[in-house]
Amino acid sequence: MKIAILTCGTLPIPAVQGGAVENLIDFYLDYNNRKHLHDITIYSPKDNKTRTHPALSSKLNHFHYIDVTSLKARIERKMYKFFHSDEYYNYFIEYYFEKAYAHIKSNSYDLIILENCPGHAYKLSQRGYKNLILHLHNDLLNSGTRYCNEISKSITKVLTVSDYIKDRVSTILSEDKIETIYNGIDLKSFSIHKESYIKRKKLGLSEDDFVIIYNGRLIKEKGVYELTKALLLLQDVPRIKLMIVGSTFFEGANSKDAFLNQLKKESEIIRDKIIFTGYIPYNEMPSYLHLADIAVLPSIWEEPFGLTIVEAMAAGLPLITTRSGGIPEICEGVATIVEKENVVNNLVSAIRDLYNNPEKRVKMSAASIERAKLFDKEAYSENFFNAIENIK
């Protein structure tokens, strides 16, 4: 088939600036290239870092880049904003969409796959497009979504990253049009047998420290603030340390972010127990995970999936997380799952339990590795293409 992939237009493909959705797109594009499946055109914002990326040499995957950063593009975006005040997304994304659409309409595609952008489905539906596939990574399409009826009429199928998201979409779309395709990661990269090139000493950690790792975006919804509060209540635990890996969004994110600064300020009283690494490139994440004794990922919102959960399991870490959104689907039975109500005290109890039970940690580590095998990038990519194979 001849397929178009339209991203939201925030980060580039290949994922040279990171991004969970962008990395997942890279996985299935690589699979498509190796398996010689389909002729795919991927629409992405332009980024100079992609120029020499080996993915661009593919004969099956074609990259159409939209300039959104040049002086000309910035002026045009401002003009677009002036003449289009009531759009689905902000003018930055809508400008990107119109530039991509100008190319899409001059081509004939068997399928158009929209990555996490129901708003693009709405605009395409208004222009006569019907056979659209929505790959949904977040809770963005339900009975409360703007133009949900118009969007649902234009969509042939929705691929969701969890049954939690599937249930949300089913409030407006029949279940036979929705299929859950669990996300995947490169399990080999996170393997516990892979030697880490980063040593504890480099980060100011001792070999006998009990190291907790949090990795992910540093935003309120991820529960990292509650985790630091839990650490305040664990000061009696000898040599306990918390390693917070990540930034507010991606490489180059604003260092003046209010939440991050507040987090650091309120952690000052236990600054000797907390290490903020800042943004870490995705390919270096396994090495940081392998420095830890346990992972704590306490989302306090309804997490759609939780790739960091899979990464921690693949690295063989005993895991503490919350009963949130799609998380239990991923790690039920192998992780300690705490309730979000009274979450700080629940985290304290769970951390104490694992600290005091090394034998339990060993068993949980083995269970994590086994469970992670369900979320390999190869299985994810195969399932993704199987789901669209019979749609014409």
Image: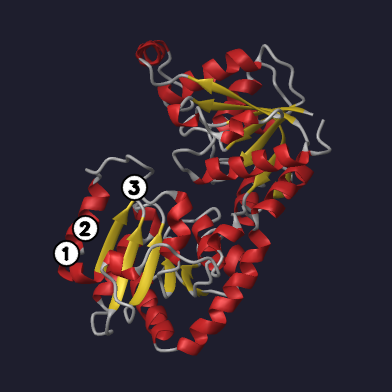
The residue beneath circle 3 is 248
Residue at 53 percent across and 16 percent down: it is 99
Q: Is residue 83 left or right of residue 194?
A: left
The amino acid at mark 3 is: Thr
Residue at 41 percent across and 59 percent down: it is 215
The amino acid at mark 1 is: Glu
Q: Is residue 37 left or right of residue 129?
A: right
When asked about the image quadrant of residue 123, the answer is top right
The amino acid at mark 2 is: Lys
Tag of residue 268: 1
Residue at 49 percent across and 82 percent down: it is 361
Tag of residue 264: 2
The type of colouring in the image is: secondary structure
Q: Is residue 330 above or below residue 77?
A: below
Whether label 2 touches label 3, CB < 8 Å: no
First reached walking from the N terminus: tag 1 or tag 3: 3
Tag of residue 19: none
Q: Residues within 10 Å of mark 3 (few under 14, many from 20)?
A: many
Q: Is residue 135 visible?
A: yes
In 3D space, how far apart are the residues under numbered discs 2 and 3 (Cα atoms)? Answer: 13 Å
First reached walking from the N terminus: tag 2 or tag 3: 3
In 3D space, how far apart are the residues under numbered discs 2 and 1 (Cα atoms)? Answer: 6 Å
Whether label 2 touches label 1, CB < 8 Å: yes
Q: Secondary structure at mark 3?
A: loop
Percent of width and height locating residue 148: 60, 34
Residue at 33 percent across and 65 percent down: it is 243
